[in-house]
Image (cartoon, rainbow, N blue to C red):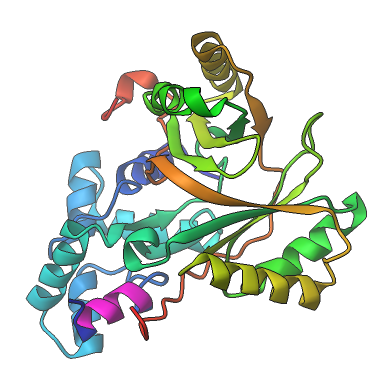
Amino acid sequence: MLDARDRQLLEQIQTGLPVCPRPYAEIGTTLAMPEAEVLERLTQLKQQGLIKRMGVIVKHHQLGYRANAMIVWNVPDNLVKQLGRQISQFAFVTLCYQRPRQAEWPYNLFCMIHGKDRETVLMQLEQLKSSCDLARLDHNILFSRRCFKQRGAVYQPKNPTSLTHG
Amino acid sequence: MLTPLHKSLLNDFQRDFPLSSRPYQDIANTLGVSEDDVLSALTELSDNHLISRIGPIIPPNQLGVSTLVAMAIPETQLQAVADKISAYPEVNHNYEREHTFNLWFVVIASNAEHLQAILDAMEQETGYKTMQLPLLDDFFIDLGFNMDFHNA
């Protein structure tokens, strides 16, 4: 579980680690937290899975991965976990979530593929379908067109008075 | 142009970024370059918008609550509605997609009430309904994104 100091630390670090010789010390300064404690807390958060990964976060689109497809499946509820785990194994899959169905939306399993172009993504989808026996399931592929806003997930602090960036 | 150092920084440090007092020095030692080389190369990648940041990927709903939202907007209205949605500071990743539900974005709020209030405000402001698709289960183990530089 996250304690209050973990929260403050994650809120501080989520917008990016400073590029300077002692970045964790600098993060600590703004929180009045010693560098050693910053490192210890981050190590623990990573071990507990509260940080999925820590590192360089690339911009796919700028690096030539221009085709971004959200593929949605209508999967029997008892198969969601199994198929979700299988789909996640493919290197070209960059997200895989279960979400609820809605009145006008029958799909409950979502995955994302970032590829260099549309043809590549469609080929990868075919590979996914044949390997996981998915072709018989109702699905839809939603390529992205315009990007109106892109920003990493920035979580707002619980206490709005401590907001630092809007 | 991307140098071998740029490529290595892009591909090899997406996870297990050193949690140590001098992480950039540690990376420099691994790659046989100087700490200054690493700091400059990362600054260049950032200035050229090839990396968004160095930081943690936090699983959804650990800090605050979030949901994916879809809206079905007539083509002629899409840009105007999208601009209104993007203006909310709680919104990120606002995209047009090829479907009747053609506007897709993520809303992050401090709690469930705050989230609902934002969605209500959006419906009121735009005149269109929002469809909430919150995360129920996450199957993805994030190991970073392996880049193929061969025809880059």
Q: Quadrant of the C terminus of chain A?
A: top left
In the image, residue B74 above or below residue A7: above
Q: Which residues are magenta?
A: B5-11
The x and y percentages for residue A124 are 63, 73
Looking at this view, name the residue that lies furthest to the front: B76
Q: Main secondary structure of the magenta part?
A: helix
The x and y percentages for residue A36 are 28, 59
Please name whichever residue, A76 or B19, is drawn nearer the observer in this view of the structure: A76
Q: Quadrant of residue B85?
A: top left
Q: Quadrant of the N terminus of chain A?
A: top right
Magenta run includes residue A56: no
Looking at this view, name the residue that lies furthest to the bottom: B32
Magenta run includes residue B7: yes
- Which residue occupies 24% across, 57% down? B49
The x and y percentages for residue A53 are 46, 63
- Which residue occupies 74% across, 66% down? A85
Query: Viewed as shown, does residue A40 lie left or right of A47?
Result: left
- Which residue occupies 10% across, 77% down? B37
Please name whichever residue, A119 or A52, is drawn nearer the observer in this view of the structure: A119
Please name whichever residue, A159 or A150, is drawn nearer the observer in this view of the structure: A150
In the image, residue A16 above or below residue A22: above
